[in-house]
Image (cartoon, rainbow, N blue to C red):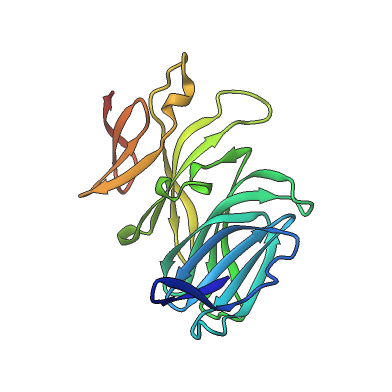
């Protein structure tokens, strides 16, 4: 992590902290106030807490090592982060999709306090933050999911709603757009938004309106 300062017509490096996850790659970064959260991954997912209070002397305050990787991090309350990414074995082999709530209220001792898994799946949220929705008034995360069971079958192409907080990370419901057998991928949910007390999800096939509390379908408009 490098800190840059505006020096007239140039950006000059004024501080840096290195050595994060040696031999690994950076998969996720989030800056909140004077703190930075960096996730690296190769086999094990270290979550580093970087103190940027003095940008000339940034320093690692704490780290947490768990299998898998949180490639997207989102603040969901005081001292809480929601991570979305890949579940993996100790050897770094992907096993599915996972979400975790991290307590980072103590920078020196970050910990995972809630965990949700879905096997043989991935989410566009892992590489496109626009695909993720956090609705703070009800503690709802909406995550698009593509689930392909290894044993075959229809799987699931849609979005999952998770209630997330310090004491919970649980599925509330699912949304799935009408399937087109000629082009099943066109039903993949790409975006979601809340308007009033309704949740709207968008795919290449159309827009679905759902109840914000139950996520039950209320209306569908095809493109």
Q: What residue lies at 55% left-to-right and 24% top-to-bottom?
A: 154
Considering only vertical position in the picture, is 6 above or below 121?
below
Q: At which x and y percent is residue 146?
A: 53, 35
Decide which of 59, 85 is in the foreground and name it: 59
Q: At which x and y percent is residue 177?
A: 38, 28
Give the quadrant of residue 33: bottom left
Q: What residue lies at 42% left-to-right and 43% top-to-bottom?
A: 173
How many numbered circles does the render carry? 0
Decide which of 89, 138 is in the foreground and name it: 89
Give the quadrant of residue 32: bottom left
Q: Horizontally, is 212 left or right of 26 in the view?
A: left
Q: What residue lies at 67% left-to-right and 54% top-to-bottom?
A: 68
Q: At which x and y percent is residue 137?
A: 30, 61
Q: At which x and y percent is residue 85?
A: 58, 51
Q: Horizontally, is 108 left or right of 176 in the view?
A: right
Q: What residue lies at 37% left-to-right and 31% top-to-bottom?
A: 203
Tell which residue pokes out farthest to the left in this image: 196
Considering only vertical position in the picture, is 130 above or below 78?
above
Quadrant of image for the N terminus: bottom right
């Amino acid at each position: 992590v490098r800190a840059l300062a505006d020096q007239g017509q140039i950006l000059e490096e004024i501080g840096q902290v290195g050595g994060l996850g040696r031999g690994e790659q950076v998969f996720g970064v989030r800056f909140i106030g004077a703190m930075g959260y960096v996730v690296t991954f190769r086999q094990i997912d270290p979550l580093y807490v970087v103190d940027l209070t003095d940008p000339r002397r940034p320093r690692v305050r704490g780290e947490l090592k768990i299998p898998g990787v949180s490639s997207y991090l989102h603040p969901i309350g005081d001292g809480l982060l929601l991570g979305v990414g890949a579940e993996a074995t100790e050897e770094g082999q992907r096993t599915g999709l996972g979400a975790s709530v991290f307590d980072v209220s103590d920078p020196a001792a970050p910990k995972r306090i809630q965990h949700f898994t879905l096997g043989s799946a991935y989410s566009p949220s892992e590489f496109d933050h626009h695909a993720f929705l956090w609705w703070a008034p009800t503690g709802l995360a909406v995550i698009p999911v593509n689930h392909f069971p290894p044993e075959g079958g229809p799987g699931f192409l849609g979005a999952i709603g998770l209630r997330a907080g310090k004491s919970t990370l649980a599925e509330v419901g699912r949304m799935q757009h009408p399937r087109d057998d000629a082009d099943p991928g066109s039903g993949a949910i790409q975006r979601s938004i809340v308007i009033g007390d309704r949740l709207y999800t968008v795919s290449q096939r159309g827009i679905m309106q759902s109840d914000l509390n139950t996520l039950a379908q209320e209306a569908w408009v095809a493109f």
